[in-house]
Amino acid sequence: MNVVVCFKSVYDDVAIRTNSDKTLDYQAVPHIVSLYDLNAIEAAAQFVEGSNGEHSLIALTVGDTKIHDTTMRKNVAARGASEVYLVMDDALEDAETHQTAQAVAAAIKHIGNIDLIICGDGSADIYAHQMGIQLGEILGIPNVNAVIDFTAEGDTIKVTRELDEEIEHIEMQTPAVLSVLSDMAQPRTCKVADIMSAGRKPVHELTLEDIGLELPPANYEVVETKVPEPTPRKMVFFEATDEGIDEFIEQVHTYLTTEGA
């Protein structure tokens, strides 16, 4: 079984700074693999590694030319993927979810002969929960989200998914798309040997033209992103006396009674 795991390159939010006008400063901010996708990569790797060589794993991402990052793709390859595909095109800068799904679907068709597609629950930047669903729709194949476990028997995928108040068990035929919850598999700590061997694994760099896709127009446009103004806090001071403490307790009790805990 040929498996593709999709991952997204996102800005490292720890390194993002705020400008004086409340806009975000992305200069010198490195790209990293979305944390939710690290969970998906681990789930896919464990599935493939447990198959005694019957399955293979390809890692796939799409984005603008900023994703041309040797460290990031080594990080992915070191986690179990046998090869990595990157679709890089400046037309994908700030692409919205539907455009990204179209690019991923076209890349999967270009790779060919894929039986199972695994996505994370969402991305660390937008967290739209849409990639797996839209991929299934575009490719015309079954898709299931909220997956916490899955196994394969021949061409049949047995899936366990977690709903709000129940656990659901589903069987479906490949090809299929699964979106896995982040707690299904914890990302591994890569060994030095894995990192060294990752540099020797094939990396395929493609453009939208290579995969035969003319990007559809966006459904929306992000005009501006700003940090919200801080909410003013009401500051009340009490004297450090018995009377002040009693007043403090009374006001807290009144607040909890009227506003709720």
Image (cartoon, rainbow, N blue to C red):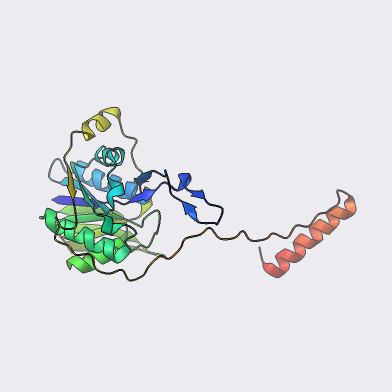
Q: Position of residue 164 (x, y in %)?
A: 41, 65
Q: Position of residue 33 (x, y in %)?
A: 34, 46
Residue 146, by quadrant, is: bottom left
Is residue 50 in view from this perspective? Answer: no
Q: Position of residue 216 (x, y in %)?
A: 24, 68
* In the foreground, 152 or 71: 71
Residue 169, by quadrant, is: bottom left
Looking at the image, residue 25 sits to the left or right of residue 251; the answer is left
* In the foreground, 178 or 167: 178
Vertical placement of 199 versus 213: above or below?
above
Vertical placement of 52 versus 209: above or below?
above
Looking at the image, residue 129 sits to the left or right of residue 136; the answer is right
* In the foreground, 234 or 171: 234
Q: Residue furthest left?
A: 113
Q: Position of residue 174 (x, y in %)?
A: 15, 60
Is residue 98 in view from this perspective? Answer: yes
Vertical placement of 113 versus 38: above or below?
below
Q: Which residue does the image show at 31% across and 68% down from the upper left? A: 218
Specify the quadrant that holds the C terminus.
bottom right
Q: Which residue does the image show at 47% across and 60% down from the upper left? A: 225
How many numbered marks have been drawn onto this rendered protein structure? Answer: 0
